[in-house]
Image: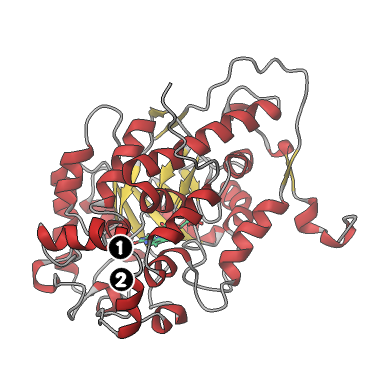
Amino acid sequence: MPDTTLGYYSTADLREAARRRLPKGLFEFMDRGNDDEVAMRDNVAIMQSIKLNPRVLNDVATRSQHITLFGKPQAMPVIVAPTGSAGLAWHEGEIAIARAARAHGVPFTLALGSMTKLEKVAEAASGPGSSLWFQFYMWPERAQSHRVIARAKAAGFEALVFTVDTPVAPGREYNLKNGMTIPFKFTAQNTIDVLMHPRWLAGVWLRYMLTTGTPRYQNFPEETQTKITALPMGRSSNFCANITWDNVRELRKLWPGKLIVKGIQHPQDAVLAADCGVDAVVISNHGGRVLDAAPVPILTLPRVVDAVGQRITVIVDSGFRRGADVLKALALGANAVMLGRAPLHGVAAAGEAGALRALQIYHDEIDRVLGLLGCTSPAQLTRDHVDLSRVLFPANNPGD
Ligand SMILES: Cc1cc2nc3c(=O)[nH]c(=O)nc-3n(C[C@H](O)[C@H](O)[C@H](O)COP(=O)(O)O)c2cc1C
């Protein structure tokens, strides 16, 4: 059998490979959090202090991690989260990740802020096994937002993911220090950084320059769609601070497919979302990239499940680095888990093969840990499998 590990055995390996391959400024732009990065660190630290209670002698010889999401069977209990600018990690990286998701039978969420046109991604990554979701932020000019949604609908995207956790721009000091400003300006510092990463320069930047030209946000309205080196660019000029629940109700009327609100951090907001008729919420602190004092999503999860779990689908993300983490969320009542950085690191490390590898790592870990817990399917997981005592009473733990 051919070796498909590429020498990467954990998502940490993929992150390290991405760090080596990408210019420092770009890697930090994709990998880091915001402000003091407390939320980002806590996502992982709290996740790691949650323990799982195994049950034994259950015959786990035959296992399956299939789930049913929105009435559709899917091969793994994960979804690829939207990560803007994946196309800067790899040439047309969005297509590479979408194809990897299709191969693993899991949904792929295309970010509004992608470098590849949504129609091109849909064409390149549809077909058997494919489930394409489209993420968007509302623009101040509502008609522009409605036009991009109409494009996603026409291209066949099944679900619309409305991200609501970033009404104003987060503080990311490292981008300023690295010269990763918007619009992008070439400085001595970032030019040297790029020149020191020739594989990225040739494989990503020059490939764009020789084909479609300077990378740009291809899904932005024509009138605002400019090169990343020019104004107006990115959401810096497009943050929409006046979104309300009325916008969700309006979207419900506009979008006939599955409607998902991403960035819920309070059970009462999950109830309001359900009242607006959405199909799902994603409990998320954006991977610790927006509000540094944000709660840790996996800890908010049980309260959201209690509040709306009988009415709508509950998805969670932020800090899921291992298959065991995914199972912790399922045991606490999540229907599925979104993965952000790991597939992005995978694609940065080795394109489609790297994204495939990222999902395979989760697949293998989920399968292994499921068996070690005495379960043969995610449906057998219950809250009884989860031990939160180290999170709730850290002082009582030996060694602390
Ligand atoms: C580089 C990067 C870009 C992102 N861009 C978006 C985006 O455009 N829209 C969005 O809803 N979330 C975006 N996110 C957040 C992810 O969808 C997801 O919520 C988060 O990465 C999950 O945390 P994790 O990275 O710890 O898995 C981005 C995350 C990263 C790391």
Does residue 67 sit above or below 181 in this rendering?
above
Q: Residue at x 52, y 66 (%)?
A: 288
Q: Residue at x 20, y 77 (%)?
A: 229
Q: Quadrant of the C terminus?
A: bottom right
- Judging by the rendered image, the residue that carries numbered circle 2 is 195
Q: Is disc 2 placed on a helix, strand or loop? A: helix
Q: Residue at x 48, y 60 (%)?
A: 264
2 and 1 marks in contact (CB < 8 Å): yes
Residue 18, image x, y percentages: 43, 56
Q: Residue 88: which quarter of the image?
A: bottom left
Residue 198: give its label: 1
Residue 137, image x, y percentages: 30, 64
Residue 335, image x, y percentages: 51, 39
Specify the amino acid type for callout 1.
Pro
Does residue 370 sit above or below 49 in this rendering?
above
Q: Residue at x 14, y 72 (%)?
A: 226
Ligand 1 quarter of the rendering: bottom left
